[in-house]
Image: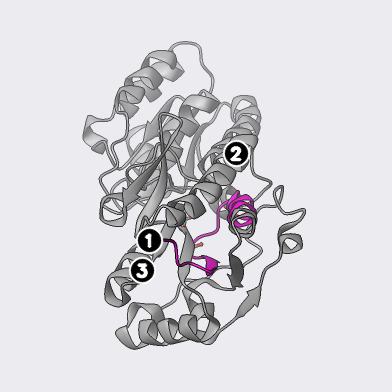
Amino acid sequence: MNTIKCIGILTSGGDAPGMNAAIRAVTRTAIYNGMGVKGIYRGYKGLITGEIETFKTQNVSNIIQMGGTILKTARSAEFMTPEGRKQAYDKLQEEGIDALVTIGGDGTLTGARIFAQEFNFPIVGIPGTIDNDLSGTDTTIGYDTALNTIMQAVDKIRDTASSHERLFFIEVMGRDAGFLALNGAIASGAEAAVIPEVEIEKNSIWETIQNGFRKSKNSSIVLVAESELTGGAMGIAERVKANFPQFDVRVTILGHVQRGGSPTAIDRIIASRMGEASINALLEDQRNVMIGLQNEQIVYVPFSKAIKKDKPINKDLMETLRILSI
Ligand code: F6P
């Protein structure tokens, strides 16, 4: 028999467009199933300090279209200590919260996993990060919106790149994953992508740049994933300037613009489905799992698998990009 009477919900780590749609879905599904809901502000930090408010269905009205997170977010150093986690546990007891739904990326789920094990506390995670770097799910909330933002930005840069006949290196987010760079490059018709998953020496970037210029193209755009492994757009631009002094090189770092904006329909829909699924999972006595989407179907992924950092990227897409840029 299900014993969960009240759930707590929080967002943690980097915000992602669609988090609000997930908060709305979790809140309304929980209320529909007779549970109380408490919104916890500023992630694990607010859990420790008790920034907690009872949520009714009206608290989540008119938020599905909003970027960011109405619950605010933070990265908590205290929650990384056993003392901090004990304080968090005491606060949950005090508030009468029997289970948690945490929305966030790798760090959020890692914290959830440790806490769930330490206190035998039911937690369900929802993957919310623009990086798309959680395993066991085809996509994460916010990734599609960020990809669209990148595509629109690159479209604009292309106008000026071609007017001035320049070579642009555009750095995109993703932490240590190349999903945004690779798929952003395909979506925007870029000439190449530099991603951490493919060694720079094995990347066809040099050939592509030369060909791009040789074959009547008067400008080129290369998307570079931020990462120590790629050296970032600045690092690569320096190397290119040294090897090809004839090119007029420019660098744009897209930065946090990629995290903002109204979520796309795809992000709103997956956030709504995953939010509903998180409550269903708790009702089914699932514990310590992340909600994932595989081939359009909801799946439950154990935290240990979700945070493994080995989500495969489809490297064939590098070849697609190369062929389409000739
Ligand atoms: O994980 C999301 C993300 O936007 C990464 O792509 C990026 O590396 C990082 O967060 C930036 O974090 P912050 O907002 O703390 O600078």
Residue 33 seen from this side? yes
- Magenta residue check for 24: yes
Q: Which residues are magenta?
A: 1-26
- Tag 3 secondary structure: helix
For the residue marked with disc 1, what is the amino acid?
A: Leu
CB-based contact (under 8 Å), mark 3 and mark 2: no
Measured from the top left, where is residue 164 in percent x and y? 61, 29
Query: Where does label 3 land, which residue?
Result: 111
- Tag 1 secondary structure: helix
Kindly identify the residue that appears in the image at 23 percent across and 37 percent down: 199
Residue 13 seen from this side? no
**Crowdedness near tag 1: few (<14), some (14–19) or many (≥20) residues, C-alpha within 10 Å:** many
- Would you place residue 3 above or below residue 158 in this image? below
Q: Earlier in the sequence, mark 2 or mark 1?
A: 1
Q: Quadrant of residue 282?
A: bottom left
Side (left or right) of 184 relative to 158: left
CB-based contact (under 8 Å), mark 1 and mark 3: yes
Side (left or right) of 67 relative to 173: right
Query: Where does label 1 land, which residue?
Result: 109
Query: Where does label 2 land, which residue?
Result: 269
| Inter-mark Cα distance, 1 to 3 | 5 Å
